[in-house]
Image (tube, rainbow, N blue to C red):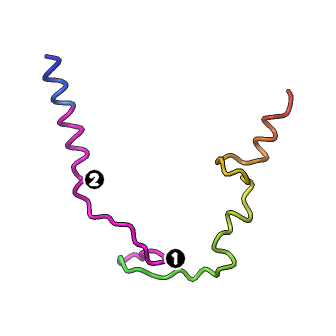
Amino acid sequence: MAGRSAATASFIILLMLLPLASSDIQPIEQGKGGLDADGVWTESVESELHSNWWSHWSRDKDRNSLDDRLEWLLDQPS
């Protein structure tokens, strides 16, 4: 009985992975921009000045996905 449930579980997992293996999604390396609603590549109209705005305005300077102010508050004694 255990062999049959393992085979069924394996089949279900493979069945879920099949669409990923047959997908034709490819990353587009055409510079800055993205696909519009019709699937046509459109160049970004963002200026170079603001292309990395998150790096300049982020409160996560050590890039560990936590706000540095929150880290500071957590490090304070109770």
Where residue 78 appears, x then y in whole percent? 85, 27
User: Under tag 1, what secondary structure?
Assistant: loop
Where residue 18 appears, x then y in whole percent? 21, 49
Q: Which mark is residue 23?
A: none
Write down the region rendered in magenta: 10-38
The residue labelled by disc 2 is: 20
In-image side of 72 versus 44 (left or right)? right
The residue labelled by disc 1 is: 32
Cα–Cα span, label 2 and label 1:
26 Å
Residue found at x 72% / y 59%: 58
Res 29 quadrant in image: bottom left
Where residue 41 appears, x then y in whole percent? 41, 80
Look at the picture and state if 53 lies above or below 40. above
Question: In this view of the protein, which residue sits in the foreground, 16 or 22?
Answer: 22
In-image side of 67 versus 40 (left or right)? right
Q: What crowding class fits label 2: few (fewer than 14 Cα within 10 Å), some (14-19), or many (20 or more)?
A: few
Residue found at x 45% / y 82%: 42
